[in-house]
């Protein structure tokens, strides 16, 4: 595991000494300044602390909660020819957010969401979510998404994550995306560098292009 501390320090909010908001911490992570080869709980906690997050104020996820989260993250970003969410350490990253970054209310709601997902799996498949196949898990997550109407600011990842009214499914999905694309696996093997301003394209299909980020 490595963390690019030099690049991170350059992008650290100037107001860090006076107290950093949760948005500042999120912005630092979104800036890709804390890329880790593979997120571990300790690496993610260290990155959050360096970004200005408060010290740990609550216990981490239980083993059962972590197993549900790991299975759900892997359904959202499965392993293909590139690493999936589990291989990138996304569950450990989100676990650190629960312990070090979320408010008490957010952490309570997130845990309740994991428990609800597990209950749904037991009702539908007579097994816990962590024991479901990828297809079974996908069916449950798709149903959860359909049941999660959201009238918030849907086109900004940061705004959705920070919105206390965001439904559990969207919070889960966005944190998985954030964790994955701030890992080295996600940033180097999934994203591609496009020089700015890039080539001029006079005929762009705007009906599909800007919406590909909305899963």
Image: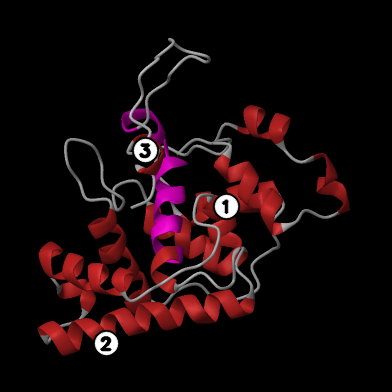
Q: Secondary structure at mark 2?
A: helix
Identify the mark nearer the N-term, 2 or 1.
2
Residue at 88% in and 52% down: 18
Q: Is residue 78 above or below residue 8?
A: below
First of labels 1, 3 by sequence position: 1
Which picture quadrant has residue 13?
A: top right
Residue at which label 3 appears: 186
Residue 118 percent location from the top left of the image: 27, 81
- Residue at the image point whose x is 31% and y is 50% from the top: 85
Using the image as rendered, state which of residue 97 and residue 195 is in the foreground: 195
Q: CA distance from mark 2 to mark 1?
A: 29 Å
Q: Is residue 111 magenta?
A: no
Which residues lie in the magenta part?
171-190
What secondary structure is the magenta-colored segment mainly? helix
Above/below status of 184 relative to 156: above
* Comes first in the chain, label 2 or label 3: 2
Q: Which mark is residue 158?
A: 1
Q: On screen, 120 above or below 165?
A: below
Query: Which residue has dot 2 on it?
Result: 119
Q: Residue 37: x and y, percent? A: 41, 37
The image's mark for residue 196 is: none
Within 10 angstroms of label 3, few (less than 14), some, or many (20 or more) residues? Answer: many
């Amino acid at each position: 595991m490595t963390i690019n501390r030099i690049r991170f320090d350059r992008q650290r909010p100037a107001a860090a000494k006076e107290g950093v908001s949760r948005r500042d911490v999120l912005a630092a992570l979104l800036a890709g300044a804390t890329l880790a080869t593979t997120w571990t709980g300790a690496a993610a906690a260290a990155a959050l602390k360096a970004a200005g997050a408060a010290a740990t104020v609550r216990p981490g996820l239980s083993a059962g909660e972590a197993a549900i989260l790991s299975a759900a993250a892997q359904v959202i970003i499965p392993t293909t020819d590139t690493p999936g969410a589990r291989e990138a350490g996304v569950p450990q990253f989100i676990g650190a957010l629960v312990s070090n970054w979320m408010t008490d209310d957010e952490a309570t709601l997130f845990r309740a969401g994991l428990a609800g997902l597990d209950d749904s799996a037991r009702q539908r498949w007579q097994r816990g979510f962590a024991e479901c196949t990828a297809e079974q898990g996908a069916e449950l997550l798709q149903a959860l998404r359909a049941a999660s109407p959201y009238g918030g600011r849907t086109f900004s990842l940061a705004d959705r994550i920070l919105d206390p009214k965001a439904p559990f499914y969207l919070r889960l999905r966005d944190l998985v995306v954030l964790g994955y694309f701030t890992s080295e696996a996600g940033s180097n093997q999934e994203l591609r560098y496009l020089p700015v301003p890039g080539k001029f394209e006079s005929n762009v299909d705007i009906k599909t292009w800007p919406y590909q980020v909305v899963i």
